[in-house]
Amino acid sequence: MKYLWTEDTGAGLHFWQLVNQLFFNGVMVLESKGSNQGILDSLSSTILQDDDIIYIAFDHVVDNQDIRNKYRMLRSYADNSDGKIIILDMICFEYLILAFEDLVAWTGTGKADKIIMRKDILSSIEGHKIELSNIKNEKTLHYISSFKRYSTEKVMKSLLGELTENEKWSVKGALMGECWYKDCCVSDHHNNIRCGKPDTNMGKEKMMRLILSDKVQDVIKSIVL
């Protein structure tokens, strides 16, 4: 059996459900473990059968000490699993959406300052973190420094939230906003809210465009079914 474990809940879990359903034809058993620690706890008590493989979507940001410690433990489980535990190489779910090339055009966000910050941050990524020395824009540096306890994941979550304020595109709720995966409004303005202009309003086509984007493919390319 092939399993996909994630720490994500809500919209993040929904994203992986859609990946499993649309890209992998639903053949994996998808389970949310609720947190990084939940994944580690489950691994400590799981007995794998001969044909079992667990793929793990684990948020890995190296500027968070707690995550670094947990990742080392996860890496130890994987290294001693005879190839049955495979860690997907990812930063976090929010990064996959933030880096999507059609994000700004599709959501119709008019936040010019945040669009510039997105570009600055995406171009600064090195080794699973935002490399501050790569950023020259003072406004972007000020935005990042405004977080009381800075981490790459926290910055990405906040910035993505601002770029997907329209609930139809939100990735903060129990599910991804319905415009990601349903036929939906794509007009210039709908009830005075920007909706953007995807070149298709077909839900499956939009979601597949996201799944086929470079960053998502970089993460799921290690999944062999």
Image (cartoon, rainbow, N blue to C red):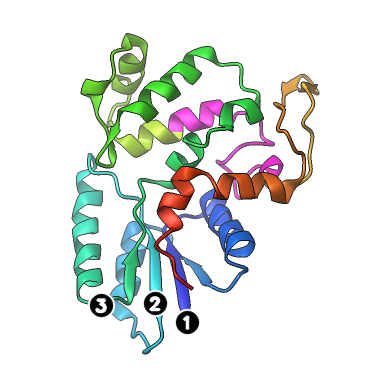
- Relative to 81, say whether 146 is above or below: above
Q: CA distance from mark 1 to mark 2?
A: 6 Å
Question: Which residue occupies 77% across, 31% down?
Answer: 186
132 drawn magenta: no
Looking at the rendering, the stretch of residues picked out in magenta corresponds to 158-180
Question: Which residue occupies 22% across, 63% down?
Answer: 75
Residue 170, image x, y percentages: 61, 37
In the picture, the disc for residue 1 is: 1
In the picture, the disc for residue 53 is: 2
Neighbour tally class for label 2: few under 14, some 14-19, many 20 plus, Cα within 10 Å: many
Residue 50, image x, y percentages: 36, 89
Q: CA distance from mark 2 to mark 3?
A: 9 Å
Q: Can the viewer see residue 33?
A: no
Residue 219, image x, y percentages: 41, 53
Query: Seen in the image, is 44 located left or right of residue 175?
Result: left
Residue on which disc 3 sits: 81
Towards the viewer: 162 or 95: 95
Label pair 1/2, CB-CB below 8 angstroms: yes
Amino acid type indicated by mark 3 = Ser
Query: Seen in the image, is 117 located left or right of residue 132?
Result: right
